[in-house]
Image (tube, grey):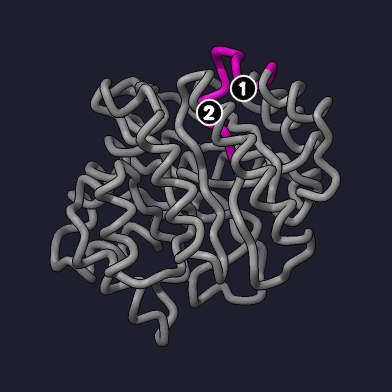
Amino acid sequence: MRLFDSHSHIQGREFAAGLPDVLARATAAGVVGVAVCGYDPESNQAAIALAATSPQLFPTVGYHPHDANEVTPAALAELESLARRPEVVAVGEIGLDFYRDLSPREVQRRVLNEQLGIAVRVGKPVCVHSRAAEGEIYEHLTMYAGSSPLRGRGRPVGVMHCFGGTLEQARRYVELGFVVSIPCTITYQNNTEARRIAAGLPLSALVVETDSPYLPPRDLRGKRNEPANVRAAVEGLAAARGIAAEAAAEATTANACQLFGVSIPVKAGAL
């Protein structure tokens, strides 16, 4: 089984000790690719540095909506410079978070639009964080999707990371050209909507993720999540659709490769 964790933060301090063991466990679990997602200046640089150690680690760069109030024009210029680097596969984690509101909403909107513009200019997809903002962010993403050069290349324009909306909302994003990411929380007993989404969207529109170190699967709640656990997301997706886990793994790995514009060797090495 070949697995691709489409969203992680393994460059963070939570993994400062023991990262080689984390990667070894991921390899043993069948993980052949991991997106290492930045969210502020420090984590962006760390994602790029970590990804340089393995051809199967793929960095993304962006500014999280929590930190939007700290994003300056100079910071946006630096972000665009990083996003143009060939090894960087996406702009993100970006978006709107109206649940915590750690930055003023108007600032979140402005910084999101600035980063969507960067993604259009560099021709890369976006990794979108949306919490309690699924209705509003759709309008921003509609304008972005219409401008993204990826549409003409048959590639997704982005991914709705750890999607927390409804199946009906998810379908609207897929129509825009996004894929939807299923996290390990699909295993939680009360998370019926995630299972509806996993069952109701085309398999071609789905990827899986851990969001490490956050959101571990049900049997590991309260513990640090890590890329090896993406298998739980795949198994949850497969169960929701009534298909074999191997088929779900093959499809979501292919979808992640198409999203990020990367390829994984058939005989992939260790992470």
Q: Nearer the viewer, residue 114 or 36?
A: 114
| Distance from the alpha carbon under mark 2 to that under mark 1 | 8 Å
Q: Position of 117 compared to 5: left or right?
A: right
How far across and how far down the image is residue 28, in percent? 46, 43
Please state if 250 lies on the left or on the right of 231 as rendered.
Answer: left
Instruction: Quadrant for the N terminus, please.
Output: top left
- Residue at the image point whose x is 78% and y is 50% from the top: 67
Establish if 261 lies above or below 143: above
Q: Which residue is rendered at x = 48% and y = 53% of the image?
A: 161
14 up-or-down from 136: above or below: above
Residues at circles 2 and 1 in contact by the CB criterion of under 8 Å: yes
Q: Which residue is mark 1?
A: 83
Q: Which residue is mark 2?
A: 119
Which callout, 2 or 1, points to the residue nearer the camera?
2
148 in relation to 28, above or below: above
Q: Is residue 90 magenta?
A: yes
Q: Which residues are magenta?
A: 81-92
Residue type of the residue flagged with mark 1: Ala
Q: Which residue occupies 23% across, 57% down?
A: 245
Going from N to C along the chain, the mark reached first, 2 or 1, is 1
Crowding near pointer 1: few (<14 within 10 Å), some, many (20+)? Answer: many
* Label 2 SS: helix
Whole-percent x, y for residue 197 in the image: 28, 67
Q: Secondary structure at mark 1?
A: helix
Hey, what amino acid is under mark 2? Ala
Figure quadrant of residue 100: bottom right
Please name whichever residue, 176 or 229, is drawn nearer the observer in this view of the structure: 176
